[in-house]
Image: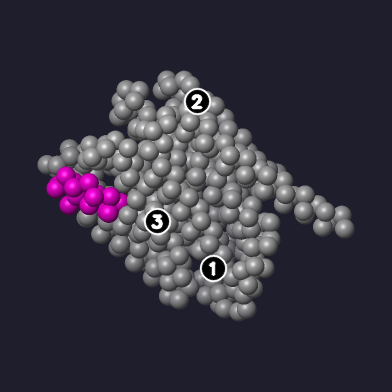
Amino acid sequence: MKNGKNVWLLMVCQALTMSIPSFMVFLASIIGQTLAPDPGYATLPVGAFLLGSALGTLPVILAMRRWGRKAIFIMCSLIAGIGGLLAIAALMKSHFPLFVAAGMVLGFGLAAGQQYRFAAMESVDAPDMPKAASRVLIGGIIAAFLGPEIAIRGESLLGTPYVGSFALLLVVIAMATLVLLFFVEPQSANQSAQGEARPWGNILSQPVIWVAVLSGLTAFAVMSTVMTATPLHMHFENGHSLVDTKWVIQSHIVAMFLPSLVVPMIVSRIGEVGLIGLGVGAFVASLAVIFSDYEFINYWLSLVLLGLGWNFLFIGGTTLLPQGYRDSERFKVQAFNDFTIFGVQSTGALMAGWLLARFGWQYLLLGMLPILAMLVLTVVYWRTARASVVSA
């Protein structure tokens, strides 16, 4: 690899920074259930966290275009630290709106972390891009355990429940900031950002762009909605212990990132489209497993399949995206892609608690099928259009 050191550094940062979403997904809705004035608002802190990440995407990427990735990575890490402090204040005051606001600030700070995969891809030659993206995502395996683990271990660490959890999260954020100091901005990345860019109409007229974006959108929409609702359905509605719920969420997040070890090999054999097909199949199986049986093993298997499907769709979309833009267009296309998929992710998390409270678990799951169908139809259209161009 051209700059393998960057890739390894970003993998470590992924492990530390991505412990924030695993921490928040596991803990925030549980805290929300105790602080919220209505059970339907229990997932609002998670939704606000994801919404903050979505809202931060555009300004963060545009700032990176002007000041470089490293400076913005560090700045956003500091913003995440402010969010952790606000959460501590909210818990000490039992103030639900402030806790929601803290989630949004934490999410905004996380927005830069979503760009680690692109920074890694820019640090290597084109043939190594899928490997670089996958290697960075491997850091999420550690994050899967780290986030929920510090949430549990910090519950009674200080006087107010879960204040210690957020104090431990601040330590993790500080460690990520220190690691980022050693990141080296690729010179070619800054140079390639200059040059003539095509109009949006030309870029968006390419079916490959829509396949890439919809692959990521589907990955996050389905995963976010089901994952956010699961702790509530499992712990509060079906009486499973907090420890069992933690294990299911941890296993899910491991499944989100562990396949990254073998995804480059899978792509070399069946291509990005085949990987996307595997992702859709894993999502359908996930919904079927948990549709009507609510034993621990059903939750565990469903959430593992959900993680696998997310990984295949997200990496498939990420590696397809550069096929639709020039180097001079990368920042604006990456911004469009991430704003779209993380915006949908936040919507799914915001609606999860409401859908579960108003319509029930099964209708929530059925609502995921049209999203999967939309992606399948888009892939079929792209493949058909490409085949017709080749035959002509």
Quadrant, the C terminus: bottom right
- The secondary structure making up most of the magenta span is helix
Image coordinates of residue 376 in percent, x first then y, are 66, 43
The answer to whether marks 3 and 2 mark residues whose Cβ atoms lie closer than 8 Å is no
Count how many numbered circles sit on residues in the image.
3
The disc, 1 or 3, on the residue closer to the chain's N-terminal end is 3
The residue positioned 45% from the left and 36% from the top of the image is 226
In the rendered structure, the answer to whether residue 105 lies left or right of residue 348 reads left
**Range shown magenta:** 87-103
C-alpha separation, residue under disc 1 versus residue under disc 2: 39 Å
Of the pair 63 and 16, the residue shown nearer to us:
63
Of the pair 267 and 213, the residue shown nearer to us:
213
C-alpha separation, residue under disc 1 versus residue under disc 3: 17 Å
In the rendered structure, the answer to whether residue 243 lies left or right of residue 334 reads left
Q: Residue under circle 1?
A: 332
Q: Residue 107 falls in which quadrant of the image?
A: bottom left
Image coordinates of residue 370 in percent, x first then y, are 58, 39
Identify the amino acid type marked 1: Lys
Identify the amino acid type marked 2: Phe
Of the pair 206 and 195, the residue shown nearer to us:
206
Say if residue 89 shows up in the picture: yes
C-alpha separation, residue under disc 3 versus residue under disc 2: 30 Å
Please tell me whether residue 3 is drawn above or below residue 369 in the rendered image: below
Image coordinates of residue 302 in percent, x first then y, are 49, 30
Identify the amino acid type marked 3: Ser
Q: Residue under circle 3?
A: 53
Q: Which of marks 1 and 2 is in front?
A: 2
Q: Which mark is residue 291?
A: 2
Q: Residue 197 falls in which quadrant of the image?
A: bottom right
